[in-house]
């Protein structure tokens, strides 16, 4: 496909915006469709945690590029990448999690990840977090966090500067032979290629066009609490919860609800039980010295939708001639967006410098598979 190709991108989250910009930078004429506001879907509810602590070579390659690009973007506009170590731990009595953690770290080191195994005392010496219940921990040095809203704002500006046309406010449907986008069943334009990056809504869009994908939505929750937390990002594998620094104090969340919601009719407010449990988890882990204690106060809480696949690898690539998808991140979409957008743009335009891994091929599934949702931050798959 020549570089002046007409390309439609459906979905203006982190992945869609990055893909649209990278396509436009390479000379494509890009139209970006978003039914809500840019970043108003899963990206706007993401935790913003970033790291390269993976045990598989494919994941490492994607994470390496994403981290490098986050750092290159830091300081541009209002976007900042905050360098912050990532601690993942198993508690006393959870021997299975500790064994999985140790195995994961060994596999990460095979890929030259800057990750170390530490005990409770060493962890306490380095970080202002509670460690008396820690059996074993891993510390990933190449990690950080960023504000997804700031990333969205930056790439909206970059897309506009690169000549991307925004079509905001219209719910669309797809046409695949030839590729096209329709509003109210009226085709707005023919395109040389269409990229569907609409999060969990990608499943319906593609199924309606005759190309089902193996994608299942699940609901995750997070909150921001007001306290003076200056520690690392922490993932508690025993409790399946996480926390990270935030300008308002601390951001905390959980992994997955094992119930498939309706992506068009779900509750974006946080459950009371989650708020209580998450605040308790923050008090437990961050209550050291001046790190919060009884002064912890809830600022805001919310829920978001993530997309799962049968094998926990995303769905990235062609589903038909000229029709592509990028979905199924298990909560890692924002973290990987700088690399996925770049690779997808190159794939659409036929530039193979950074090919999409075969393990991400959406056509590896029939699209009607039954599978259980597994959260994205488990130790055995990092």
Image (tube, grey):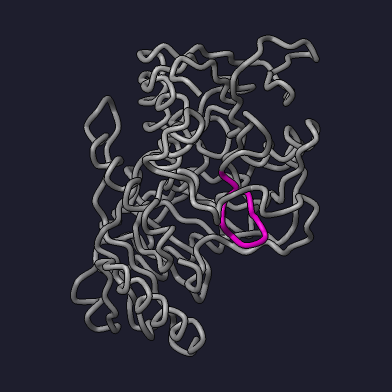
- Tell me the quadrant of the picture where the C terminus can be found: bottom left
**Which residue sits furthest left?**
125
Q: Work out whether 207 lies above or below 366.
A: above
378 vs 366, left or right, is left
Which residue is located at x 54 percent, y 15 percent? 6
In this rendering, does residue 128 appear at all? Answer: no
- Observer-nearest residue: 270 or 190? 190
213 vs 139, left or right, is right
Q: Main secondary structure of the magenta part?
A: loop
- Observer-nearest residue: 6 or 307? 6
Q: Work out whether 37 lies above or below 106.
A: above
Q: Work out whether 58 lies above or below 323.
A: below
Residue 235: x %, y % from top left: 42, 66
Image quarter of residue 337 = top left
Q: Work out whether 235 lies above or below 76.
A: below
Residue 78: x %, y % from top left: 29, 28
Image quarter of residue 346 = top left
Residue 67: x %, y % from top left: 31, 48
Q: Which residues are magenta?
A: 307-316
Which residue is located at x 58 percent, y 34 percent? 197
- Observer-nearest residue: 148 or 359? 359
In this rendering, does residue 366 appear at all? Answer: yes
Which residue is located at x 59 percent, y 49 percent? 361
168 vs 261, left or right, is left
Residue 101: x %, y % from top left: 42, 78
Residue 141 lies in the magenta stretch: no
Residue 311 lies in the magenta stretch: yes
Which residue is located at x 56 percent, y 44 percent? 316
């Amino acid at each position: 496909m020549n570089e002046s190709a007409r390309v439609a991108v459906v979905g203006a989250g982190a992945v869609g915006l990055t893909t649209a910009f990278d396509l436009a930078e390479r000379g494509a004429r890009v139209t970006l469709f978003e039914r809500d506001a840019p970043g108003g879907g899963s990206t706007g509810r993401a935790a913003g945690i970033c790291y390269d602590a993976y045990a598989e070579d494919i994941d490492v390659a994607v994470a390496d590029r994403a981290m490098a690009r986050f750092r290159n973007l830091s300081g541009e506009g209002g976007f900042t990448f905050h360098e912050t170590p990532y601690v993942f731990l198993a508690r006393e009595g959870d021997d299975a999690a500790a064994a999985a953690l140790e195995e994961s770290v060994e596999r990460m080191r095979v890929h030259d990840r800057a990750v170390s195994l530490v005990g409770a005392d060493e962890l306490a010496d380095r970080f202002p977090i509670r460690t008396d219940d820690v059996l074993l921990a891993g510390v990933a040095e190449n990690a950080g966090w960023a504000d997804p809203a700031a990333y969205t704002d930056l790439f909206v500006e970059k897309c506009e500067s690169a000549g991307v046309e925004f079509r905001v406010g219209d719910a669309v449907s797809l046409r695949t032979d030839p590729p096209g986008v329709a509003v109210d069943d009226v085709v707005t334009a023919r395109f040389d290629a269409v990229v569907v990056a609409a999060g969990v809504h990608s499943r319906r869009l593609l199924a309606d066009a005759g190309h089902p994908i193996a994608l299942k939505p699940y609901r995750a929750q997070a909150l921001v609490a007001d306290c003076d937390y200056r520690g690392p990002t922490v993932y508690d594998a025993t409790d399946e919860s996480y926390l990270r620094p935030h300008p308002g104090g601390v951001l905390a969340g959980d992994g997955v609800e094992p119930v498939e919601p309706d992506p068009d009719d779900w509750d974006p407010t946080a459950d009371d039980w989650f708020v209580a449990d998450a605040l308790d988890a923050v008090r437990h882990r961050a209550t050291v010295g001046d790190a919060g204690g009884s002064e912890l106060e809830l600022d805001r809480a919310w829920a978001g939708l993530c997309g799962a696949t049968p094998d926990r690898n995303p769905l990235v690539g062609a589903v038909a001639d000229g029709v592509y998808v990028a979905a199924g991140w298990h909560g890692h979409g924002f973290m990987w967006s700088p690399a996925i957008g770049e690779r997808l743009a190159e794939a659409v335009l036929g530039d193979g410098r950074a090919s999409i891994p075969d393990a991400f091929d959406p056509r590896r599934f029939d699209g009607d598979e039954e599978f259980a949702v597994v959260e994205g931050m488990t130790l055995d798959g990092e």
